[in-house]
Amino acid sequence: MERLFSYGTLQLAQVQLDTFGRLLEGQADTLKGYVVGEVEITDAAVLKSSGQRFHPALIKTGLATDTVTGTIFTITLEELANADSYEVDDYIRIEESFSNGIDAWVYVAKS
């Protein structure tokens, strides 16, 4: 199983149903050293699923005082591939360590 941290639209029920075919269960957690910015979405399928033109995007600051809260979901490798397809090219997936000691994948801003 894989772990995926969501701080944005992957927490929305409709996005989970469209992307994974089910509602996900997870636990709240915090990521240090990041702030939330945003990216404009132009992909029609992503716009339809999320209903939002602008999506949050993590920007690394490296400052321990900057934190982002969200949810860590446990998903399959196939579901992780589905999440990769959902996220637009403005994001990259990296692995980070979280406040509770768990490592998880997270999508961050490319630039």
Image (tube, rainbow, N blue to C red):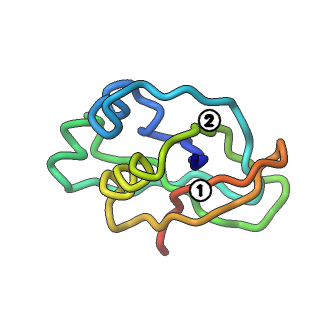
Residue 21 location (% of width, % of height)? 31, 31
> CA separation, marks 2 and 1?
11 Å
Residue 109 location (% of width, % of height)? 49, 65
Q: Is residue 50 left or right of residue 7?
A: left
Which residue appears at 41% of the width and 46% of the height? 79
Give the answer, above or below, for where 15 lies relative to 31: above
Look at label 2 and name its amino acid. Thr
Q: Is residue 29 left or right of residue 13?
A: right
Q: Label 2: which residue?
A: 71
Mark 2 and mark 1 in contact? Answer it, CB < 8 Å: no
Give the answer, above or below, for where 71 lies relative to 109: above
Q: Nearer the viewer, mark 2 or mark 1?
A: 1
Which residue is situated farthest in the bottom direction here? 111
Which residue appears at 45% of the width and 54% of the height? 38
Where is residue 47, by image quadrant? top left
- Secondary structure under tag 1 reads strand
Which residue appears at 70% of the width and 60% of the height? 96
Residue 103 location (% of width, % of height)? 72, 54
> Residue 34: which disc?
none
Exactly how many numbered labels are in the figure? 2
Q: Residues within 10 Å of mark 1 (few under 14, many from 20)?
A: some
Residue 50 location (% of width, % of height)? 30, 36
Give the answer, above or below, for where 40 lies relative to 10: below
- Secondary structure under tag 2 reads strand
Q: Residues within 10 Å of mark 2 (few under 14, many from 20)?
A: some
Look at label 1 and name its amino acid. Trp
Which residue appears at 68% of the width and 45% of the height? 68
Q: Earlier in the sequence, mark 2 or mark 1?
A: 2
Q: Is residue 8 left or right of residue 47?
A: right
Q: Is residue 58 left or right of residue 87?
A: right
Where is residue 19, by image quadrant? top left
Q: Label 1: which residue?
A: 105
